[in-house]
Image (tube, rainbow, N blue to C red):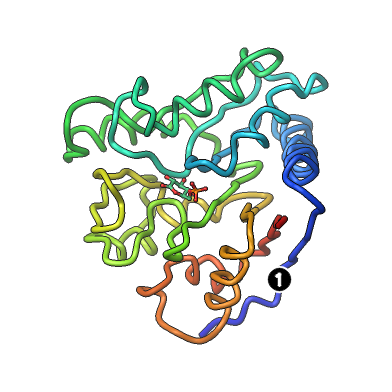
Amino acid sequence: MTENVALDRRTFADKPTLAKELAEAVADHIRNAIETRGSAAIAVSGGSTPARFFQFLGKTKDIDWSKVIVTLVDERWVDDTSNRSNALLVNERMLQGPAATARFFPLYSGGDEPDADAVAKTNTLLAELPEQFAAVVLGMGSDGHTASFFPGGDTLAEALSAEGPTLAIHAPGAGEPRITFTLPRLLRTDGLYLHIEGEEKADVLDTALGDGPVEDMPIRAVLRSGHAVTVYWCP
Ligand SMILES: O=C1O[C@H](COP(=O)(O)O)[C@@H](O)[C@H](O)[C@H]1O
């Protein structure tokens, strides 16, 4: 097992404070990437946790948002009018105001299933991404999934090892078919964050940091990757 000696766990008093601090950290990465590489790309999670963080980040004024690409670490295979769509959340909560001039690269490319053609279409769009993300912000489910690396996922092993950039995955706990960036592609990032809230998820993280198979708690693949991970947590 690869021990992650580079785990930095930060605790915040409440959800608004965490969201503001995380937005400032990601904004720093964006500004640095624009300064050093001319543009910045970030990949963010969906679900319910990041909404407040998206609002703070999207309101950041001292970023040239026209040089920023925003994408998702994973997506449910639903169109962007569905309340299950991670893209809808990003559009409604982040890509308003100052951030409205950012480019958004969706992972959902149409149809009922993320079949080979649909994933190829998404991957063609993603070929425009810079080699390195400025920041990747992961979430985590109470089953230990992150991105769409779900326990029991039919392509989990490939998702954790392939170059990608994305692939389709189906899992009993996933709700819908999913598309996810692969772990190797997500690890090509300046900053890697795990944003979790509440005692239950802190306990899940503690369990994940113990021994046990990656297949049971795929977040372990991130924690054991050797990449520095900064955990943002609040009660
Ligand atoms: O389905 C998903 O769930 C996880 C966790 O979401 P949360 O609602 O518990 O915050 C999320 O990180 C992932 O991007 C999303 O597709």
Query: Residue shown at 25%/57% (left/top)?
Result: 171
Residue 105 at x, y = what percent? 45, 27
Describe the element under mark 1 as helix, strand or loop: loop
Query: Residue shown at 45%/65% (left/top)?
Result: 144
13 vs 208, left or right, is right
Is residue 108 shown above or below 220? above
Nearer to us in this view, 199 or 233: 199
Quarter containing the C terminus? bottom right
Nearer to us in this view, 217 or 103: 217
94 vs 47, left or right, is right
Residue 18 at x, y = what percent? 76, 46
Classify mark 1 as within 8 Å of ligand 1 or not, answering yes or no: no
Q: Amino acid at mark 1?
A: Ala
User: How busy is the neighbourhood of tag 1: few (under 14 within 10 Å), some, or many (20 plus)?
Assistant: some
Give the mark count: 1
Circle 1 is placed at which residue position?
6
Is residue 138 shown above or below 221? above
Residue 219 at x, y = what percent? 49, 66
Query: Residue shown at 53%/28% (left/top)?
Result: 90
Query: Residue shown at 75%/66% (left/top)?
Result: 8
Residue 108 at x, y = what percent? 32, 30
Is residue 5 shown above or below 235? below
Instruction: Identify the image quadrant of residue 120.
Output: top left
43 vs 60, left or right, is left
